[in-house]
Image (cartoon, rainbow, N blue to C red):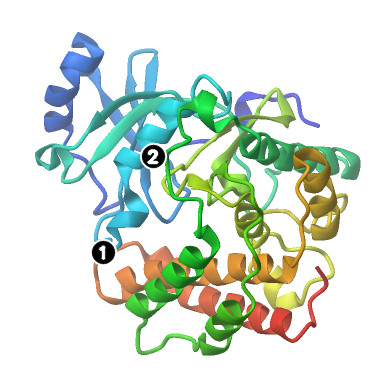
C-alpha cells in the first residue's frame, strides 16, 4: 500500500463548459455566511458524477463544497437540495460519515437553482479502477470492501427517533411505491432509440416481496465513488457523499440498489466491461458474501434477493436513461452522457438474465 498520501487525494478540475457558476452573485450571497474571506473565493469542479453537480469553493486555506442540481434536468424530485440538506442536518450528530451542512439557498437568482454548502472532507475517492499508486493486496481489498458495506449497515442501524427522522419519509408501502415510481420514470425518459424494458417492469410488479418490517435511513445511491476513504489508511471510510435520494424506507431495497453496481468475477463479460468500481478484483467479496455479512451486521434476513438485485439494476437503467434523455434533447453539453444509452441496454440484459435464473447471486 502506497505511503504517498497527497497523490491519493481526489483532485478537482476546471469547471466544465455549460456548468459555470455566477461567481460574483455567489460571493455577494455568501458574504453574510462566510465573512469577508469570500472576496478571494475561487471555484473548481469535482470531475466525477453524472447527476447533481459538485464544486469546491476555496478562499485562502479554507474549503467548502457546493452542491446544485444538473443543468437541464426535468426530474425535480431526484435533485431536491432541501431534502439532502435536511437529512445531513439530522444525521450530523448520530452518523459520523455524512458531511456537515453549512448553508442552504432556495433563491434561484443566485446561480439558477437551489444549492447548499457543506464542509469539505479531503480523502480518496475510488472510481472504476484503483489509482495506480494504490497497491492493495487481495486481503486488503477484501477488508476495504467489507468496511464499505459495514458503513452502509451502520446507516441502517441509526436510531430514527434519536436522529429526529422518525417522521421523515413514508416507510409503509415503500417497496411498491419504488417499483411504481421507477417504472413511471422510465416511461417519462424514453427516447426513440431506447431499450425495451417491458419484461422487467412486469416481472418486478409480479414478484414484489412483503415489506421487511424494518424502517431505516437509506442512502439510495451508496457506491464507491460516493464514499471517501482515508488517504493515509485507504481501508477506512471517512465520508459518505451524495444524499440527494436518501429517505426512510426498507433497507433491503437500499442493499439491492448498491449491489446493482456490484460486478463480480463470474458475471458475464458484457456486464463486467461496464463496471463502475473495482468490485471484481482479486479479493473482492461476492454478492453472496456481502449478503451474509449484511445479515450478521443488521440482524435482517435477506430473502427474495433476485428481486432486490433486479430492482437495483433496473433503477440504474432508468437513471442512465434519464441522463441520456438530457443529452438526447440537447439539455446538456456533457458528451459523457451519450454512453448511457449503451449502459441502459447492458443493465436491461442483466435484468432479463436474473429473471431467467441465469445469474449467480
Q: How far apart are marks 2 and 1 (CA)?
A: 18 Å
Q: Position of residue 358 (x, y in %)?
A: 80, 82
Q: Nearer the viewer, residue 320 or 104?
A: 104
Q: Quadrant of residue 360?
A: bottom right
State the residue at coordinates (41%, 26%): 89
Residue 84: assigned label: 2
Furthest-right residue in view?
A: 139
| N-term-proximal mark, 2 vs 1 | 1
Q: Which residue is drawn at 74% across and 67% down?
A: 304
Residue 10 image point, x, y percent? 54, 35
Of the pair 68 and 342, the residue shown nearer to us: 68
Tell me where residue 280 sits by quadrant.
bottom right
Horizontal arrangement in the rendering, residue 91 relative to residue 346 (left or right): left
What is the x, y in percent for residue 52? 37, 49
**Vertical arrangement, residue 339 with respect to residue 18, above or below:** below
Comparing labels 2 and 1, the label whose residue is closer to the camera: 2
Amino acid at each position: 500500500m502506497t505511503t504517498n498520501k497527497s497523490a491519493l487525494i481526489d483532485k478537482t478540475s476546471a469547471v466544465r463548459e455549460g456548468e459555470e457558476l455566477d461567481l460574483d452573485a455567489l460571493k455577494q450571497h455568501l458574504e453574510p455566511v462566510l465573512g469577508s474571506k469570500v472576496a478571494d473565493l475561487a471555484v473548481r469542479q469535482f470531475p466525477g458524477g453524472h447527476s447533481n453537480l459538485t464544486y469546491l469553493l476555496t478562499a485562502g486555506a479554507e474549503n467548502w463544497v457546493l452542491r446544485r442540481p444538473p443543468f437541464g434536468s426535468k426530474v425535480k424530485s431526484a435533485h431536491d437540495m432541501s431534502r439532502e440538506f435536511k437529512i445531513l442536518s439530522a444525521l450530523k450528530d448520530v452518523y459520523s460519515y455524512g458531511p456537515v451542512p453549512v448553508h442552504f439557498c432556495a433563491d434561484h437568482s443566485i446561480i439558477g437553482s437551489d444549492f447548499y454548502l457543506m464542509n469539505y472532507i479531503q480523502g480518496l475517492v475510488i472510481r472504476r479502477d484503483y489509482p495506480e499508486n494504490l497497491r492493495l493486496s487481495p486481503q486488503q481489498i477484501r477488508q476495504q470492501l467489507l468496511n464499505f458495506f459495514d458503513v452502509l449497515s451502520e446507516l441502517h442501524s441509526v436510531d430514527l427517533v434519536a436522529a429526529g427522522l422518525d417522521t421523515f419519509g413514508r416507510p409503509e408501502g415503500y417497496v411498491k411505491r419504488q417499483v411504481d415510481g421507477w417504472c413511471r420514470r422510465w416511461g417519462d425518459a424514453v427516447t426513440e432509440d431506447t431499450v425495451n424494458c417491458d419484461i422487467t417492469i412486469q416481472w418486478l410488479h409480479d414478484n414484489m416481496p412483503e415489506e421487511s418490517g424494518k424502517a431505516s435511513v437509506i442512502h439510495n445511491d451508496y457506491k464507491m465513488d460516493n464514499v471517501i476513504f482515508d488517504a493515509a489508511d485507504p481501508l477506512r471510510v471517512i465520508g459518505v457523499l451524495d444524499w440527494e435520494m436518501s429517505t426512510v424506507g426498507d433497507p433491503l431495497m437500499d442493499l439491492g440498489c448498491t449491489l446493482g453496481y456490484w460486478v463480480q468475477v463470474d458475471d458475464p463479460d458484457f456486464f463486467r466491461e461496464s463496471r463502475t468500481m473495482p468490485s471484481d478484483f482479486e479479493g473482492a467479496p461476492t454478492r453472496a458474501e456481502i449478503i451474509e455479512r449484511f445479515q450478521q451486521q443488521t440482524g435482517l434476513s435477506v430473502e427474495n434477493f433476485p428481486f432486490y438485485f433486479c430492482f437495483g439494476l433496473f433503477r440504474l437503467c432508468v437513471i442512465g436513461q434519464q441522463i441520456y434523455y438530457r443529452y438526447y434533447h440537447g439539455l446538456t453539453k456533457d458528451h459523457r452522457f451519450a454512453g448511457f444509452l449503451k449502459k441502459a441496454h447492458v443493465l436491461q440484459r442483466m435484468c432479463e438474465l436474473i429473471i431467467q435464473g441465469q445469474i449467480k447471486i
